Image (tube, rainbow, N blue to C red):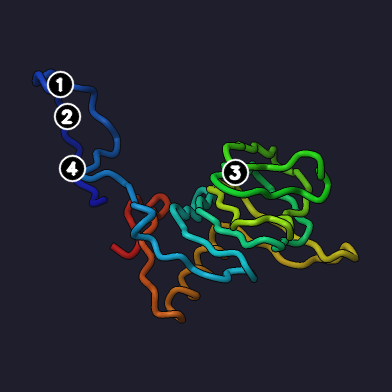
Amino acid sequence: MNAKFPTQQKTSTGALLPLVGLPQDTLLTVNIEQVPLIKNVFPGIHIQPLRIDPERGEWVFKAIVEPGCSLPIHYHTGTAQVWTIQGCWKYLEYPDQPQTAGSYLFEPGGSVHTFYTPKENTEDTITIAWIEGAQVSFNEDGTFHSMNDATSIQYALESLAAARGIGPVPYIRGNSADIAGS
């Protein structure tokens, strides 16, 4: 989106609307069919970024996860929202609460869990996730493993895409209010 001098917008009948702070000349939208799949961001976990906003600390992405994949135990400093489109995934700490197609999960900040897809899954699991803040991961012995946030995810995805010759990747970029790769 290109910034322009604010002007009053009108209804279809010509009535003036209140002056808005950030008029836009285009919708901020990406078509997931045009966003390349970045394979094996983590082993067996493939990502399509939809929006990455380092200023707000938010990252929204589609994930395709093969059966038998897992992430280290971790917590989120902010909230996480996950919509399951296909397949099944679980948290080791909540084995009787599988997330299956149609599930929506809201996690308050500070939630601790270990993500995995069951080995017996017969299909890939597909989710869309909206993460706020950082994901702080630990090894099984409790020592620090890694930290991912919007800035590190943006760097990793753009670096992987460039190294694999699939960039630039179109996704909605933070407060700069435009689409990367466009």
List x then y, in percent, for residue 58.
Answer: 53, 49
Mark 3 vs mark 4: which is more N-terminal? 4
Q: Amino acid at mark 2?
A: Gln
Give the crowd class for mark 1: few <14, some 14-19, many >=20 residues within 10 Å. few
Question: Disc 4 vs disc 1: which is toward the camera?
Answer: 1
Q: CA distance from mark 4 to mark 1?
A: 16 Å
Query: Residue at position x 36%, y 57% from top?
Result: 33
- For label 3, the residue is 82
Q: CA distance from mark 1 to mark 2?
A: 6 Å
Query: Residue at position x 68%, y 62% from top?
Result: 147
- For label 2, the residue is 8
Q: CA distance from mark 3 to mark 1?
A: 39 Å
- For label 1, the residue is 16
Question: Disc 2 vs disc 3: which is toward the camera?
Answer: 3
Mark 3 vs mark 1: which is more N-terminal? 1
Mark 2 vs mark 3: which is more N-terminal? 2
Quarter of the image for residue 146 reads: bottom right
- For label 4, the residue is 5
Q: Amino acid at mark 3?
A: Val
Mark 4 vs mark 1: which is more N-terminal? 4
Q: Amino acid at mark 4?
A: Phe
Where the C terminus falls, by quadrant?
Answer: bottom left
